[in-house]
Structures are given as structure tokens and as C-alpha cells.
Image (cartoon, grey):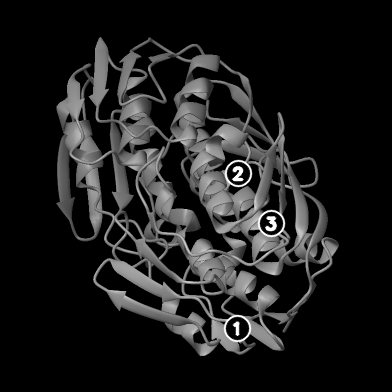
Amino acid sequence: MGEKIKIEGGVALRGHVRAEGAKNACLPVMAASLLCEGEVTLCDVPPLQDVLSMCQVLECLGARVAYDPAEKKMAIDARGLCGVEAPYPLIRKMRASFLVIGPLLARMGKARVSLPGGCAIGIRPIDLHLKGLRALGAQVLIGHGFIETTADRLRGERVYLDFPSVGATENIMMAAALADGVTVIENAAEEPEVVDLARFINAMGGRVAGAGTDTIRIYGVPGLSPAVHTVIPDRIEAGTYMVAAAITGGQVTVDNVIPTHLVPLIAKLKETGCDVLEEESSIHIRRSGHLRAVDLKTLPYPGFPTDLQSQMMALLTLARGTSVITETVFENRFRHVDELRRMGAQIKIEGHTAVVTGKERLYGAPVKASDLRAGAALVLAGLAAAGSTEVSCVHHIDRGYHRLTEKLASLGAAIKREE
């Protein structure tokens, strides 16, 4: 049956909690380590299931990986890189493992990767990845559940992305790092995780300019050298704790954050009536009065992140008035709605829009996590609900949150995991 998270709601959270290194920054950086003919050291690597899955992918390709989860430090040595195929059993666990295709193509001239899996939140097509690799001179063959790419030598080229895809931007950036000439990615993703990957490539001796804007230039170099890199803090994990403080009417300080990465969430929480104080590497959040309804629309960075939409929806089920949430990034990002309704939430779905009419309270119920962020939203709803909530399928939550129940318990939540 797997484990469940049991919550007795109604406790206002108080105290300090630290965000881990960002999962969505760590995974592409791990993939980029394949570009280096030497050992790289990564710091603040969270011990998450996705990280362990990526370790398996890298080892399958011939890299040596040494990871100390207690120290959150990882050493990756890809000098012995010999494989070019990432097998289906590993790729299906986690979509981000598709990111090895760019580095493999750059280092080995060939990559054979299963069509990816991951959370069931939408189509998330890989055509933009392949469009970019083709532009750099790769031949792409798709068949029998695999994508096979080959290139005698990658060449710098101008690539326009029809949508600012984070994964496509990262894959093209990594492939271009060792290509001949200059690659220009237009309409590139601007997310902090893209900037962190560029920092890592540059630390190894690469030449990436413009990361964090919509135009990134990559000047190809002959090879990359060992480096030490600290992964940026996880803005989505930090945001989840901020919403937890708001939904319970508590007062929480989240440490190890970069406040500028959370500007859209901070703005929306202030609109709901929360007090938010930003410091250099921490954010204090307090809610003492009633929540006010707000409208929000998910957009690529610097817009409101889709990965915090479900958590905000849980919060807005308790706000006074009617909130309208528009999801523009992933088409299946409302799968948590039926579960929130089981807890008494009043939510109506109209295409890509959810209309949330705030209620006085939610009620505990048995609910099921359908994906990573949906699971987080249900835990938050349980923290605020009257009575007992039981969240099943918590393996989804483990993909993106390290010791979530322990961290919430340290803030006073009545929460535990059990078989």
C-alpha cells in the first residue's frame, strides 16, 4: 500500500525552516557534469528520489558518482564515459533524465534515450529539444520508444524556441557548450535554474552569456575542466513553506532562499493580506487576519510559477471572495481539484481556469496525491483543515521534498508518516 501522511489540522505553524538546494537546478547540473573530462563537486545536493535516479542514469553511462546525503555533497567523474544509451526503466521514472541527451551528443557524438516519463501533468513535448539539436547539426531518429541522435561535430547556430521551455533551453545550452562557433538561443527560458546551469558551465571553463534573459549566447570551447559548484536554493520548496505559514495563520521564517526568485509569490501573498519581510537570504511570513481572494495566472519565469499553483489554490479555498486561477503552462495541472473538493473546497473548472469560492473552513478527509505539487497542496490543505487528513501516494511528494513531514513538525504541525 505504501506510506501515508496523517495530519491533525488547525495548528498555526511557527518557527524557522531551511529550504534545500533546488531539485530543478541540481538535475541539469548533474547532467552537465558529463561534459567535463574530470571530477566535479556539487554542494547542497538534496537527497531526493529524483536525484538518486539521476545518479543511476549517470552511472549507467559510465560516470563515477559518489554522494554523501548527510553532507549533501556529490562528486561526479565522467572521464570514463562510455555509454550513449539511457534505458527506459530509469528514464520513465523521471523526465529530467532526458537532459543527458545534449551532453552525450556533445561528448560522444551520439545519444540514444527512451522517450521520457515523469509527473502526469501534461504533454510537455520534447520537440523543442530536438529542434534545437537539429539546428546544431544533429541527425534525429525517433522510433520504437527511443530517440537516437548523432552528430559528427556540432556547430553553433541561431535557435528560436516557439515557447521558452526550460528543459529545451538547458539541453541546447549543454550541447552548444562544446560545439564549434557561437550558438544563440532566442526566446530562451529565464528561470533561475537556467542561470544556475550557466554558472556551472562557466565555472568549468565554458562561455555562456545572457542566461536569465530571453537571449542566451553560448561560445563553444574545446573542453571543460573540473569545478566546485553550490546549487541554488529551491524556490518551490521555500514557497511551499511560505504558503504553509499563510494557510495556517502562522508565523514562519524560511532560511536559505533568494528572495528575488520568489517575487511573484511574495506579491500574491501580500495581496491575500499576509505580511512578508525579505532579508538577504531569508523570508519572514506572518498572517493574522482573514485571507482575501486574489486572481493569478501561471506563466514562464518571471511570471507566477506553475509549480506553486496548486499550493496557492489550497490557500485560496479559505479566502474571502472568489479567486480565478488560470493555468497556461501545463494542461493537466488541476488534478488535485477533486481531492480538495473532498475536503469541502468549492472549485469550478472551466477549461484552463479554476474558479475558487472561498469557504470558512476545510474538513479532513482521505485524499490521494496525483503528482508532486498536488501532493504538497493536499498536505497544506490538511494542515488547515478541521479534523484528520490522510494523504496517500506520498512517493510523489518524496520526488521534490526532503523530510517534508519532519520539517513541518518542527514548526508545530501535528503530522507524521506511517505505513
Dot in front, 1 or 3: 1
From what the image shows, is residue 123 above or below residue 256? below
Which of the two marks, 2 or 1, is nearer to us in this view?
A: 1
Mark 2 secondary-structure assignment: loop
Determine the image quadrant of residue 256. Answer: top right
Point out which mark residue 362 bears: 1
Q: CA distance from mark 1 to mark 3?
A: 26 Å
Residue that carries the numbered disc 2 in the rendered image? 234
Cα separation, mark 3 vs mark 2, equals 11 Å
Kindly identify which residue carries mark 3.
Answer: 402
Instruction: Please give the name of the residue rendered at 78% of the width and 76% of the height, measured from the top-left corner.
Output: 416
- Disc 1 marks which amino acid? Leu
Image coords of residue 126 (percent x, y): 25, 48
In the image, taking residue 169 as reference, residue 83 lies left or right, namely right
Check the image and report above or below for 125 versus 389.
Answer: above
Q: Going by the image, does 171 lie left or right of 404?
A: left
Q: Is residue 210 above or below residue 94?
A: above
